[in-house]
Image (tube, rainbow, N blue to C red):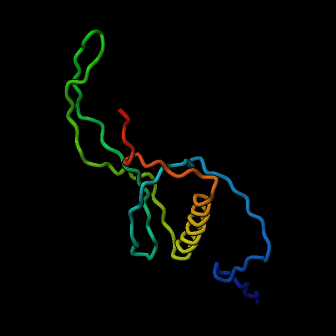
Amino acid sequence: MAQKRKVKRPTDFKRPPRFQTKFTTSRSFRTIHADGAWGGVTPQGLINMASFSETRPFPQSVTYTLENEALKEESRIEDQSIIREVEVGVMMSLPVARALRKWLDERIQQLEQTLSGPSVPAPLDVSSQTESK
């Protein structure tokens, strides 16, 4: 009679106390700019987060006149809406979302400490500057 082999489930796996990880990037890896995120919870209980960047649309048309061999913009037709270009979507489990939140909190704290240090100049408030005449 053949002996039954116990199959390890992912929940049975225990990491050793010390291990090394190595990083590699996929062929589709890229760095993106994020102005925000949109998403929710899927019916399967995953968190769906889509990152987007915001921009204004290009004008529908621009009319120029030629004056003294230089172009002068005469009129422009443009849409005043904001475009949210969705760059990437990330699906994650609740434990991964919690780990990501913890990692972000640590990076935010690190950045806030760096920005509050004496070596960083105060930001310039352009709105309060006046022109000298």
**Extreme residue toward the bottom, this view:** 1
Residue 68 image position (x, y, % from top left): 27, 9
Identify the residue shown where x is 36% and y is 41%.
130
* Frontmost residue, 47 versus 98: 98
**Extreme residue toward the top, this view:** 68
Question: Residue 35's image quarter?
Answer: bottom left
In the figure, 110 relative to 73: above or below? below
The total of numbered circles placed on residues is 0
Residue 79 image position (x, y, % from top left): 22, 42
In the figure, 59 relative to 47: above or below? above
In the figure, 107 relative to 128: above or below? below
Q: Is 53 situated left or right of 3 in this image?
A: left
**Extreme residue toward the right, this view:** 18
Q: Is 20 situated left or right of 65 in this image?
A: right
* Frontmost residue, 30 versus 123: 123
Q: Is 131 situated left or right of 31 in this image?
A: left
Question: Residue 16's image quarter?
Answer: bottom right
Indicate the quadrant containing the C terminus: top left, top right, bottom left or bottom right: top left
Residue 109 image position (x, y, % from top left): 58, 67
* Frontmost residue, 113 versus 49: 113
Identify the residue shown where x is 24% and y is 28%.
62
Identify the residue shown where x is 24% and y is 14%.
66
* Frontmost residue, 91 versus 130: 130
Residue 51 image position (x, y, % from top left): 44, 57
Identify the residue shown where x is 76% and y is 90%.
1
